[in-house]
Image (tube, grey):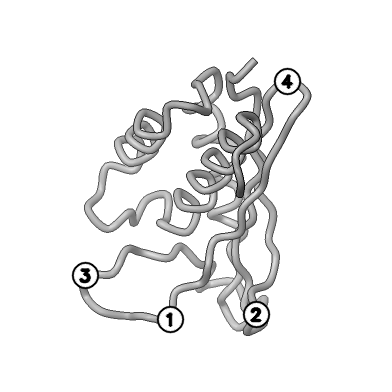
């Protein structure tokens, strides 16, 4: 079956040692995960990377609030959706956020989930990752 059963996120570290999000998407008897690359660009038109600035962990760079949003709001919103309909899954997350630069959920949260869904779709179809 290709319907999303659940989504879970956790904090991991990128190649520069900065906290970032890893999302794992589950369907019956299968799962795939993806790690969101941490952005280095800081332009005014960049998508928003949600970080715990008020938390002193990792110099305010932890992503625990974004992880909570993946595990609650995003997971609830895309549960039951087909992993083979990437456009719909992405549109649901973008609409759930509702902001131009993804400031409510964080582009890092949305991107990690989106990449995990795409990887799981390819994996289930036995396509190269």
Q: Quadrant of the N terminus?
A: top right
Going from N to C along the chain, the mark reached first, 1 or 4, is 4
Question: Is label 1 in contact with label 4 (beta carbons under 8 Å)?
Answer: no
Who is closer to the viewer here, 56 or 31?
31
Horizontally, residue 27 falls left or right of residue 39, namely right
Q: Secondary structure at mark 2?
A: loop
Going from N to C along the chain, the mark reached first, 2 or 4, is 2
Q: Which residue is mark 3?
A: 45
Horizontally, residue 73 falls left or right of residue 97, namely right
Neighbour class for label 4 at 10 Å: few (<14), some, many (≥20)?
few
Horizontally, residue 61 falls left or right of residue 31, namely left
Q: CA distance from mark 2 to mark 4?
A: 32 Å
Q: Which residue is mark 2?
A: 15
- Name the spot of residue 16 as percent of width and height, x first: 62, 84
Q: Which residue is mark 1?
A: 40
Q: Secondary structure at mark 1?
A: loop
- Name the spot of residue 48 as percent of width and height, x first: 35, 64
Going from N to C along the chain, the mark reached first, 3 or 1, is 1
Which mark, residue 28? 4
Question: Which residue lies at the image location 60% right of the left edge and 66% below the top edge?
Answer: 20
């Amino acid at each position: 079956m290709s319907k999303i059963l659940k989504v879970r996120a956790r904090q991991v570290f990128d190649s520069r040692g900065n906290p970032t999000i890893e999302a794992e998407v589950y369907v019956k008897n299968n799962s795939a995960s993806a790690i969101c690359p941490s952005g280095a660009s800081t332009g005014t038109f960049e998508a928003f990377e949600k970080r715990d600035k008020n938390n002193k962990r990792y110099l305010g760079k932890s992503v625990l609030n974004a992880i909570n949003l993946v595990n609650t709001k995003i997971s609830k919103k895309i549960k039951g959706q087909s992993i083979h309909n990437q456009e719909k899954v992405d549109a649901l997350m973008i609409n759930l956020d509702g902001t131009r630069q993804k400031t409510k959920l964080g582009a890092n949260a949305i991107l990690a989930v989106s990449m995990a869904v795409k990887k799981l779709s390819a994996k289930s179809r036995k396509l190269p990752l």
